[in-house]
Amino acid sequence: MRATTNLKSDCEKAHHCEMEQRVNIKFCFKLGKTATKTHEMLVKVYGVDAVSKKCVFEGFKRFRDGKEDVKDEPRSGRPPINTTPDNI
């Protein structure tokens, strides 16, 4: 069970780090930085945990299209399930 707890903790950290980077991408977009320069800065700060260049370019496209929210849009299909020690 310990491994599951650590995995969940690591996943939560990764999600938090990704959301933080999305906010930073939006900030750089609003400052007029390029997507390439933004990605370079993210790599400088987050190293191997930085989001991909493709992700940065997609974020810039969303913001150019007028979308302001940094959260994922709802998706169709099967909803995610939570993994707990009780349902493993």
Image: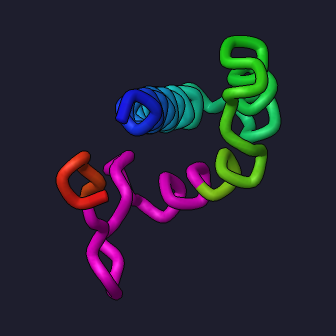
- Quick one: which residue is furthest to the top in this view? 45
Residue 79 in which image quadrant: bottom left
Left or right: 14 in relation to 9: right
Tell which of 9 and 76 is nearer to you. Answer: 9
Tell which of 40 and 34 is nearer to you. Answer: 40
Left or right: 64 in relation to 47: left
Question: Magenta part mainly helix, strand or loop?
Answer: loop
Q: Residue 72: within the magenta? A: yes
Residue at the spot 39% in from the left edge and 28% down from the top edge? 2
Residue 6 place in picture, x, y as percent: 43, 27
Residue at the spot 41% in from the left edge and 59% down from the top edge? 66
Tell which of 44 and 76 is nearer to you. Answer: 76
Residue 59 makes an appearance in the image: yes
Give the residues drawn in magenta, as a range: 59-81
- From the image, which quarter does the C terminus lie in? bottom left
Residue 32 place in picture, x, y as percent: 62, 32
- From the image, which quarter does the N terminus lie in? top left
Left or right: 86 in relation to 65: left
Residue at the spot 77% in from the left edge and 14% down from the top edge? 44
Residue 10 place in picture, x, y as percent: 47, 29
Residue 30 makes an appearance in the image: no
Residue 75 against residue 40 in the figure, above or below:
below
Residue at the spot 25% in from the left edge and 57% down from the top edge? 82
- Quick one: which residue is furthest to the left in this view? 86
Left or right: 69 in relation to 29: left
Residue 53 against residue 6 in the figure, above or below:
below
Residue 15 in which image quadrant: top left
Colouring of the image: rainbow
Residue 65 place in picture, x, y as percent: 48, 64
Residue 70 against residue 80 in the figure, above or below:
above
Q: Residue 80: within the magenta? A: yes
**Number of marks in the rendered image:** 0
